Amino acid sequence: MALASNLASAGVKPWDIVTAIVSHAHVPSSGGARWLHDNHKVTIAARRPDSRWVEEGDPVKTAAVEYGVPPKPVPVGLELSREGRLPGGCEAVEVLFTPGHTPGSVSIQIETREATVLAVSDALGRLRREWASSERDWIESLEKISSRDPDYLCTSVTCMDRKAARAFLEETREKGPFWDVEGRATYG
Ligand SMILES: [Zn+2]
């Protein structure tokens, strides 16, 4: 499983995790949540309506159909109902609402002693009608993300330093929102 091996390579023990924030419903981002919940009693956090789709295992809204895998429904123990610092003493983690790709997409900004990291997952990824994507929300989320100045910006594909992030955001702005009507693209 990708999540287990990624955690291992980062030196993170899954049983040490208290809360896992699911950025949005799609299986590449939410599929490991059930393993964390069932095997390591991790509280899953997500924002509506994506949280509901994850709980229900909605095959279309989780993009399980598209990726050709079964949905993995999992209880969401923490609804992210507002932006800001994560409740429960996780002062270093700030939740940002970045809808557009899906209506419940969230990004998180993490402050460590070494660096500030903004993780946006698929927030700037493609749009699909089946996911209830919104072009207007996507543009607003791009502006919100661009207003930050983290040391590193991470998408679901890669992490970039500040200079590369600025170039990436500029390029994303120039390209504009991308409606995917034909099927799977490489990003998102
Ligand atoms: Zn996605």
Image (cartoon, grey):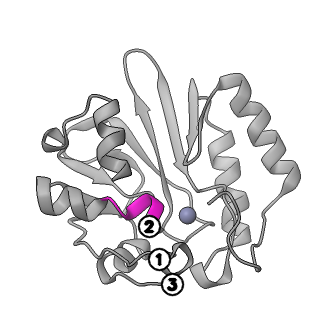
Question: Which residue corresponds to the image point at 17% horizontal and 54% vertical from the top-left?
Answer: 42
Q: Specify whether residue 95 is painted magenta.
A: no
User: What predominant SS class does the magenta segment belong to?
Assistant: helix
Can you give x and y, in whole percent of width and height, for residue 175 in the image?
86, 54
Residue 27 visible, this angle:
yes
State how far apart marks 1 and 2 are (Cα): 6 Å
Q: Position of residue 163 (x, y in %)?
A: 72, 23
- Give the distance between the C-alpha atoms of the residues marked 3 and 2, in whole angstroms: 10 Å
* Magenta-colored span: 28-32
N-term mark: 3 or 2: 2
The amino acid type, in three-letter code, at marker 3 is Val
Identified by mark 2, the residue type is Val
Q: Secondary structure at mark 2?
A: helix
Q: Which residue is mark 2?
A: 27
Q: Earlier in the sequence, mark 1 or mark 2?
A: 2
Which residue: 14% across, 63% down?
38
Q: Amino acid at mark 1?
A: Ala
Q: Which residue is mark 1?
A: 64
Q: Mark 3 falls on what kind of element? A: loop
Give the spatial CA distance, label 1 vs label 3: 6 Å
| Circle 1 crowding by C-alpha within 10 Å: few under 14, some 14–19, many from 20 | many
Across and down, in percent, residue 74 comes to 25, 72
Residue 135 appears at what percent x and percent y? 73, 70
**Would you say residue 24 is visible in this rendering?**
no
User: How many residues crowd around disc 2 within 10 Å: few (fewer than 14), some, or many (20 or more)?
Assistant: many
- At horizontal 37% and vertical 23% (from top left) the residue drawn is 112
101 relative to 187, above or below: below
